[in-house]
Image: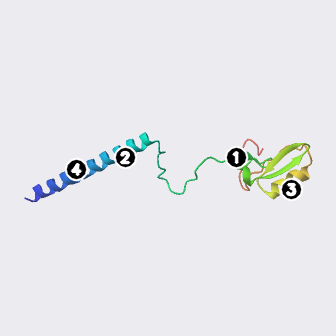
Amino acid sequence: MLFRGILLLLRFLLVLVLVRLVLRFVAGVVRGMAGEPKPDRRPGRARGAVDLVRCAACGTHVPADGALAVVAGGAQQRFCSSACRDQAVRGGAGAAPVYARPSGVRFPDLDR
């Protein structure tokens, strides 16, 4: 008797799952035919891509709208922070970019 009850409950749950899958499929087909975009189910994700630029002093990529821009010699350079901007300005026009690395990080090929 108990086994039959459990079997009946499992069958009922299986039917519910199948009905839900069929309804979701039909709703997706209807949305697709209506031309609606697929809903984004990931909360907190940014919508759309952001243009990135590389800092002329340290090489870090930052959003273009948040970068500090300096025009020198007719060319525009962008920096991630005022410290990087000041470092490049002190280095003079046409100075090679200086790529900083975090303190304590060692590169065997470079640290000889």
| Residue where numbered disc 3 is placed | 86
* Label drawn at residue 91: none
Q: Is residue 28 left or right of residue 104?
A: left
- In the displayed structure, would residue 96 be above or below residue 42? above
Q: Secondary structure at mark 2?
A: helix
Which mark lies nearer to you, 1 or 3?
1
Q: Where residue 72 appears, x then y in whole percent?
A: 90, 46
Kind of residue indicated by mark 4: Val
Q: Nearer the viewer, residue 28 or 94?
A: 28
Nearest to N terminus: mark 1 or mark 4: 4
| Residue where numbered disc 1 is placed | 52
- In the displayed structure, would residue 25 be above or below residue 2? above
Residue shown at 70%/46% (left/top)?
A: 52
| Residue where numbered disc 4 is placed | 15
Residue shown at 19%/53% (left/top)?
A: 12
Q: Is residue 67 left or right of residue 5?
A: right
**CA distance separating discs 2 and 3:** 57 Å
Kind of residue indicated by mark 2: Ala
The image's colour scheme reads rainbow
Which mark lies nearer to you, 2 or 4?
2
- Image quadrant occupied by the N terminus: bottom left
- Image quadrant occupied by the C terminus: top right
Q: Where residue 79 appears, x then y in whole percent?
A: 79, 51
Give residue 32's quadrant in the image. Answer: top left
Q: Secondary structure at mark 3?
A: helix
Nearest to N terminus: mark 2 or mark 4: 4
* Label drawn at residue 27: 2
Q: Secondary structure at mark 4?
A: helix
Nearest to N terminus: mark 2 or mark 3: 2
Kind of residue indicated by mark 1: Leu
